[in-house]
Image (cartoon, rainbow, N blue to C red):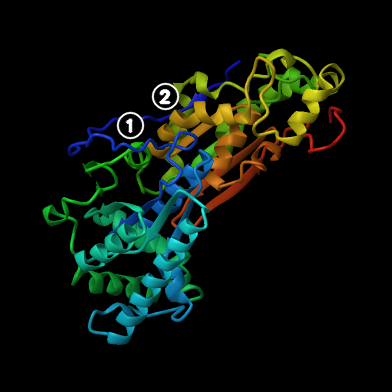
Amino acid sequence: MGEDGYFKPQMRKVPTGELMQPSRKTNGYGVQAEDTRICVVMVGLPARGKSLIAQKVVRYLGWLSIPAKTFNVGQYRRSNTPTPTAEFFDTSNAEGERLRRAAAEAAVDDMIRWFAAGSGTIAILDATNSTKDRRRWIQERCDAEGIETLFVESKCDDEDLIMSNILEVKTTSPDYKGQDPEKAAQDFRNRIKNYEKVYETIDEDESHMTYVKLINVGKQVIINRIQDYLQSRVVYYLMNLHIKPRSIWLSRHGESNFNLSGQIGGDADISDRGEAYARRLPELVKQSAGDRELTTARFLEYEKLEWKALDELDSGVCDGLTYAEIAEQYPEDFKQRDDDKYNYRYLGGESYRDVVIRLEPIIMELERSENILIVTHQAILRCIYAYFMNVPQERSPWMEVPLHTLIKLTPKAYSTIEERLKADIPAVSTFREKGSLAKHQ
């Protein structure tokens, strides 16, 4: 029941340090010790992708049902200093130093309260944390509360990538909202210079700590003293990341004959209108691509891969039935699915939760790739879209993903930008709202 999934895989060697033996705790959501709490501490100069990495990790963990939250020190600092200049970050500025320290303390205090309330499993402390003294203070605060620490340093000396991040920050950072872009970029460069004066990379003096160093967007990864399963799960994800600018295009297959008849599952041929959309899709991608992305059109002509993991959700005994037929033949199941669509598993088939589990390798491939297009089925696109747009589990199975529509997602440091392009080719709607009558639209 598969459709083509399009990938542009990239292979690279990843040197690593020694991976330590797991501790006695058993982690992983569903099989973890109840008291497992991990603080992932971001480390790095500005414009090294720390906030992007932080929000990606939280999004990934939430997608896997592991509760996580980012505590961004900059957001705490903005309550007192919403639009600071570079001088605020000069180490000789005593008042700036005091306010920045107060913001870090407030973020850590809130994080500890969040853990104490049982609200989550993993917290991300997003800041530069650029000195050994600051990292030692965080380690001691967490140790006192029984919270594990995992330091993640993002190092980069690729000037093109740093400049790309600076250009993005000047247009998306709350610190420069409403300011002249060129003045904002210059001020941000000056801010980086102030941090460079005192920056201390993680080195052998901190070999007692658990840490990961991501060098030049994952070209080299150094791992030290990973303690348990849940930490290793985060590290595995980090090893697949890059922070280069890119876009992801998502599309359902062209309208099928089962779409027309209202049947679910199956492996039906596409309709005449579906054929027309298939021919139109490459032009839609080219139309939506920016100058840097125009090379994307190449993989529409070759480098195609079919992945079985992109098969539609298995509807089991309901395969080939309409929703009206399911409601008539399996009324209790129809109601149970409406009540909890994410966790409901078709008799002999799958749930949305099952689909997320089998899609995890796809997500890793997407994170390794640059510009990429995926063509697949409705339930699969809902799960992939939910990952990139941080859609709650209970809402993701009810999202409308129309036929003959191209979705472009562009990850940024503080959000993911979405664009939709509709082909001028009619198609039936397969969307059914929760609690609605089981009638084909």
Q: CA distance from mark 2 to mark 1?
A: 12 Å
Residue placed at 53% from the left, 38% from the top? Answer: 249
Q: Nearer the viewer, mark 2 or mark 1?
A: 1
Packing grade of label 2 (10 A; few <14, some 14-19, many >=20) is: few
Task: Say which quarter of the image contains residue 18.
Answer: top left
Q: Which amino acid, by three-letter code, is at mark 2?
A: Glu
Q: State the residue at coordinates (20%, 38%).
A: 16
Residue 439 horizontal/vertical position (percent): 86, 28
Where, quadrant-wise, is the N terminus in this rendering?
top right
How many numbered circles are shown?
2
- Left or right, 233 with respect to 421, comes to left
Q: Residue at x 73, y 33 (%)?
A: 425
Name the residue beneath numbered marker 2: 303
Q: Position of residue 56 (x, y in %)?
A: 44, 48
* Residue that carries the numbered disc 1 in the rendered image: 10
Residue drawn at 58 percent across, 49 percent down = 418
Q: Is residue 315 left or right of residue 309?
A: right
Q: Nearer the viewer, residue 234 or 146?
A: 146
Question: 225 left or right of 387?
Answer: left
Above-or-below relation of 10 to 121: above
- Residue 220's quadrant in the figure? top left
Residue type, mark 1 in image: Gln
Tell me which label, 2 or 1, sits earlier in the chain. Answer: 1
